Amino acid sequence: MSSAIINGKEIGQEIRKSIAERVQLLKEQGVTPGLAVILVGNNPASQTYVRNKQKSCEAIGIFSELIQLPEDVTEEELLVQIRSLNHRNDIHGILVQLPLPKHIDEDKVIATISPDKDVDGFSPVSVGKMMLGQETYLPCTPFGVMKLLEYSGIDIAGKHAVVVGRSHIVGKPMGQLLLQKDATVTYTHSKTPDLPSITKQADILIAAVGRANFITKEHVKPGAVVIDVGINRDDHNKLTGDVDFKAVDGIASHITPVPGGVGPMTITMLLYNTVQSAENTLV
Ligand code: GUN
């Protein structure tokens, strides 16, 4: 029997519908949620991501402003832009598309974004609050995965969740969010020996390694829920996840496809955080 597909496109659309309703309520109260997106340089993948974020904003009535800066912009010029956005009343969320050119200190840039407008949830204040279980903006991709599990009726408490990958953006916060829902969490990464012996214990397996088809049959316990966070291009330039879907289909109880799984949820949660920030200005 095939694994049940967790459809991120459908779940994302359902959530976006309720976000759009919140946007309308805000507009009736004279507030249009606003997102500023800063894009440095000409990285084609970043350009595509940013275009998709802007289109998604437009579709539900969020105002978005793109600030494009040249590859050789100085760090100080970028920080000046962020400080100016921090003070603007019409901007509720600020997103600096990563990666940044090598001459710019990414940590310094992220720390300059006002925590009130850090809709990516990457700043040290946001990360600290998340660790403490305090209210804050959660990073969009792991937040989106939590919504996928919730909407698919998957219980987390008491389950063994294994996270493969330890990035600041996905792996680390993913484990924290699962822990807060009472999972037993194991982190694994590129230096973990005998990875399959650990991933095979997972009730919930999160693949966030950034390597095409890395997770295969030998990594998955029958009946596990497999969440594929990877967005890779294979040898034929086809969009491919971190999970070898064909090999794992039928072993997992549930699986997310690529595309159409986690991907649409990341932007959905960015919209969610931006609207939350706009609502916070009313209270
Ligand atoms: N680059 C890749 N993913 C992300 C993301 O979620 N946010 C930002 N700002 N940059 C990214």
Image: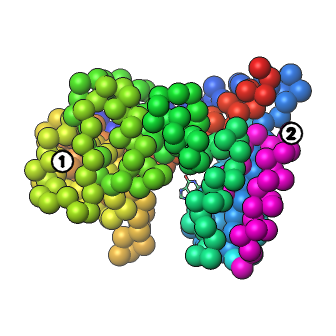
Q: Is residue 281 above or below residue 249?
A: above
Q: Find out whether residue 77 is within the magenta segment.
A: yes
Kind of residue indicated by mark 2: Asn
- Residue positioned most to the right: 30
x and y percentages locating residue 129 in the rendered image: 53, 34
* Residue at image coords 80%, 59%: 81
Q: Secondary structure at mark 2?
A: loop
Q: Which residues are magenta?
A: 72-96
Q: Find out whether residue 76 is within the magenta segment.
A: yes
x and y percentages locating residue 89 in the rendered image: 86, 39
Q: Which mark is drawn over residue 199?
A: 1
Q: Quadrant of the C terminus?
A: top right
* Callout 2: CB less than 8 Å from ligand 1: no
Q: Earlier in the sequence, mark 2 or mark 1?
A: 2
x and y percentages locating residue 83 in the rendered image: 79, 53
Judge from the rendering whether residue 173 lies leftward or rightward of residue 4; answer left or right: right
Taking the image as four quarters, which one is ligand 1 found in?
Answer: bottom right
In this view of the protein, which residue sits in the foreground, 20 or 101?
101
| Disc 2: which residue | 89
